[in-house]
Image: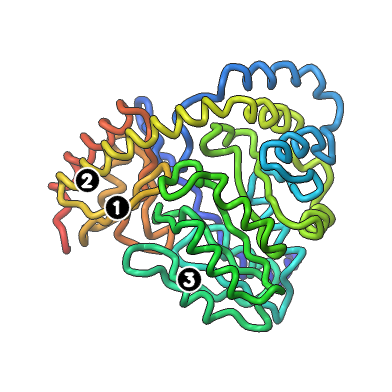
Amino acid sequence: MSLEFAERLRRIPVYPAAETYEFGGDLVKLASNETPWAPHPAVLEAIERELRTLNRYPDPDKATLRRRLAERLETTPARIAVGNGSCELLLAAADALLEPGAEIVYAWPSFSMYPHLAAQSGARAIEVPLDEEGRHDLGAMAREVTAATRIVLVCNPNNPTATALSSEEIDAFVSELPRHVCVILDEAYIEFSTLQDPDDSLPMAERHPNVVLLRTFSKVYGLCGLRVGYGLGSEDFRAAVDRVRQPFSVNALAQAAAVEALEHQDEVVRRVERVATERLHVEEAFEERGLDSTDSQANFSWVSLGGRDEAAVMRGLGERGVIVRGGAALGAEGHLRVTYGTRAENDRFLAALDEVLPKVPANA
């Protein structure tokens, strides 16, 4: 007799994790939107100090980190939820807000976790196509909002298309929505956007109690391996997501690292500048090769293969030790999502691309 799993398990998609290929040398990993630079030395020292306390549970309230975040964001700790990556907060929001008969609205293609929220809760997912420039069509999204809508997701900058909207556009959109709708503004890449200062969206959460700003330490702070993210919303939202999660979900090393990372905003500025330099380098290289890409406001490019066989291009790059993400797994076949690495890594990717593209005819 086999195990009987819950019916909802069949609805939950498998998260499309980046593939790794067998390669006899160093891999260039440009598939997961990681920063190529290690954490700040002081962050590493904070982690090392915390190693001596691992016989104790981490602070379940994340009190020090929430307090430091509140100081940084000029708000109160009661409005800040800290999670095991921003993904945990997304899943907790679904647990707290969604149920059968409810609806969730989001653009597509967008972050691959979003389909999980409806699938795990039994809610109805409404996916709204991006516009021709790969941006959120806010007008079309607003038209899909009904009395049953509980969550609207806006990924800004959007993953995987790297496009972004201004905070003014999003604020106007939120102002027209009913107050019962929780608008989660997923800002995992906001530090890389040239359209706004990261602080520009903070007043939105003050003006609109139904807005949640979701951010992460994984990207610009370089803490992917520790998984820590946070949300700024109402006190009710923070209490709700905390209630549905397991205790101690954010480990002690992650909390210590994030607290220290907040002290080094100058390092954030340097990293953003370096990413912007590499973004220009890679985008210009695509243009020289006749490849169309969106206007990236993130730490990665979304580039069209012009009708070439995506699997063949991915295979060719992998054989040369370069790992990127294919668009098929992200909702739009015929594209590549390419993270910006160091100059040497980016040039190795471009050299591999030059070898692969002539072997894969366009518009095949």
Q: Earlier in the sequence, mark 1 or mark 2?
A: 2
Q: What label sits on residue 303 in the rendered view?
A: 1
Please state the horizontal and vertical placement of residue 204, each as a whole percent of the image.
62, 57
Disc 3 target residue: 138
- SS under mark 3: helix
Mark 1: few, some, or many residues within 10 Å (few <14, many ≥20)? many
Residue in the image at 17% along x and 40% along y:
354
For the residue labelled by badge 2, is the local secondary structure a helix, a strand or a loop? helix
Q: Earlier in the sequence, mark 3 or mark 1?
A: 3
Q: Is residue 10 above or below residue 20?
A: below
Q: Is 129 on the left-hand or right-hand side of 201? A: left
For residue 27, what is the image quadrant?
A: top left
> Where is 357 relative to 220, above or below?
below
Residue at mark 2:
286
Q: Which of marks 3 and 1 is in front?
A: 3
Tag count: 3
